[in-house]
Every structure is written in structure tokens, then in C-alpha cells.
Amino acid sequence: MQRYILVRLLQSLVSLVAVSMIIFLLGRVVGNPADALLPPAATDEEKARVYRAWGLDQPLYMQYGRYMGNALRGDFGESWKWQGYTTADLIKDRLPATIELAVLALFFGLVVAIPMGILSAVSKDTPLDYGGKVIALIGQSVPAFWMGLILMWIFAVELEWLPTSGRGGPETYVLPVIAMGWFQVAAFMRLIRSAMLDVLDTEYVKLARIKGVSEWKVIWKHCLRNAAIAPLTYFGIILGTLIAGSVAIETVFTWPGVGKLAMDTVAARDYQVLQTIVIMFSGIYIGCNLVVDVLYAYLDPRIRYA
């Protein structure tokens, strides 16, 4: 077991290093980072001075080595656009808003998807089941940012019930949470429906019904408990996916999170902050996958020997 965990941990570290190398090189391929620091009319002497100050006159492998060495000490450098702010400070200020949005979207997805998935499985091949399939199809087909724009147009522009953007009172959370969580509603519902259908055909469920156990107890206690393995697996990685996928929703609703900060850094060509955000998002996603793999090994011993 320890060997399996060690191998998966090393694989995760290699993946994270590979991501850091790719994003670091891409930031240099698309243009010279010094262009974001210098005015268009800068002289060669001014350019050389900036290159020396930021270490941009060194070979790429030395620049990368210095960046990673500082990152391991918790120093991700200073922002090139927002002078006087470090990369860590900018992300630290925005991260709570992103986590709030991701957790609420995940909660919304679970609260809506669990009863819908159960009802769809219990009412197989009925209008209720077909309606659930349509909702799942729409949820997984419509991009989150498009769902956000539609919700904004209906409830903020036409009906004027909710604000269009910003982070403030509870009403500002409604539209971005629904837009971000609707895909999870569809995904969770399909997983729960499929797992419930498999469990409903098992012998112990038939035996429980023969013994006279009430239907609600059969479904909510016996069936749901055994059908929860696949959704729980998905639950283990979806939080990381939500955090990493917050860019579009935060941009649409002007939500002051890390996703919106990433878009601002792209527009400002602040590669120092952007590469740190991408590495952080990648680390969260890889970490969630690592936790799920380890839990799998505990749940099914066959996996650790595969």
C-alpha cells in the first residue's frame, strides 16, 4: 500500500513540474515579458536595465530554476502590472471568493441532483424520467458561461430580480452559483440514476420488498447507500474542477475571484501572476485526483496491485 501511494505521489509531482515548465515556456513564447514593463518608446539601454533587474537576460533554464527555487520557499515573485503587490498577496485576496463560489455550486449540484437522480431511476421510462434526461442533456451540453448569460438576461435584465454582477449580499450569489453548478447537477444526476438502476435490480432489494420493508426505506436507506460509490468518486475530484473552471463564470459575473484575476493578468500580460495561478489550479486538480486514487486503493485492494 505504501509503495502504491509513493508511486502515485511521485507521478503527481512529475505532472505538476511538467505543467510548471509548460506554462513558464508558453509565457516566453507568446512574447517578451519585458514588453509589459516598458513603454513602446523605451530605449535599448532602458530595456537592458529591465532585463537585468528581472533576470530576463539569463537563459530560460536559469530563469525557470530561479522561479521554482523561489516558489519552493513560498516566494512567487512580484506582479509586473500591479506594482507593490506580490503574486501571493493578489491570489490570497481573491482565493476566498473563488472557494465560496465553488463550494456553493457543488452544494447546489448535490441538493438538486440527488433527488432528481433517485426519482428518475425509480420512475424509469416515465415522463418524469424523460424530463430528467432532458435536464441532464441540457446541463452537460450548454457551456457554463452561456448558461450564465442566459440567466443574467432573464433574471437580471428582463425581470430585474437579481443583480448582474459583483459579490455582495446573498442575492449576488444566486446566478453564478446556478450557472456554475448546473453542469454538476446533470453529471451527478446521471451517475446517481445509473447506479440506482443497478442497485434496484439486486436480490437483496427484492428480498427487502418481499419482507414488507417500506418503499421509502428501501430506496433511501438500502439503495442510495450502495449506489453512492460512483457519485462519491466523482465528488472527490469535482471541487478541484470547479475551482479551476471558475474563470468563465467569474468573468461573466465580474466575480472578484482568482478566475477573474487570471483573465485580468492575460489582458495585462502579467505572466508572473498568470503562471502562478495556472500552477495553483493544476496543483489543486492533481491533488484531488491523488486523494481519490488513494481512497480507491483503500476501498478496493485490487487497485493497489494493478
Image: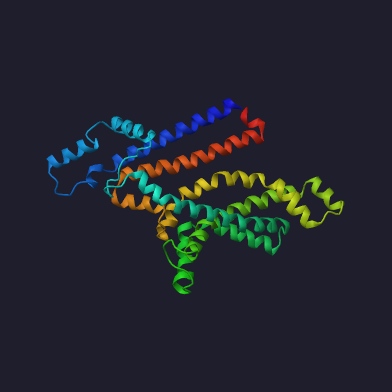
Residue 57 in view of the camera = yes
Position of residue 40 relative to residue 22, above or below, is below
User: Quarter of the image holding residue 300?
Assistant: top right
Q: Return the residue found at the far top.
A: 3
Image quadrant containing the C terminus? top right
Q: Is residue 299 left or right of residue 287?
A: right
Q: Residue 218, image x and y in percent?
A: 78, 53
Q: Residue 153, image x and y in percent?
A: 45, 69
Q: Return the residue found at the far right.
A: 211
Residue 306 in view of the camera = no
User: Quarter of the image holding residue 127?
Assistant: bottom right
- Which colour assignment does the render follow? rainbow
Q: Is residue 138 left or right of residue 93?
A: right
Q: Residue 105, image x and y in percent?
A: 53, 55
Q: Nearer the viewer, residue 201 or 74?
A: 74
Q: Is residue 286 left or right of residue 216?
A: left
Residue shown at the point (65%, 58%) measured from the top left: 116
Position of residue 61 relative to residue 79, above or below, is above
Residue shown at the point (48%, 57%) measured from the top left: 144
Q: Is residue 163 left or right of residue 194?
A: left
Report how many numbered discs are placed on residues in the image.
0
Q: Nearer the viewer, residue 79 or 109?
A: 79
Image quadrant containing the N terminus? top right
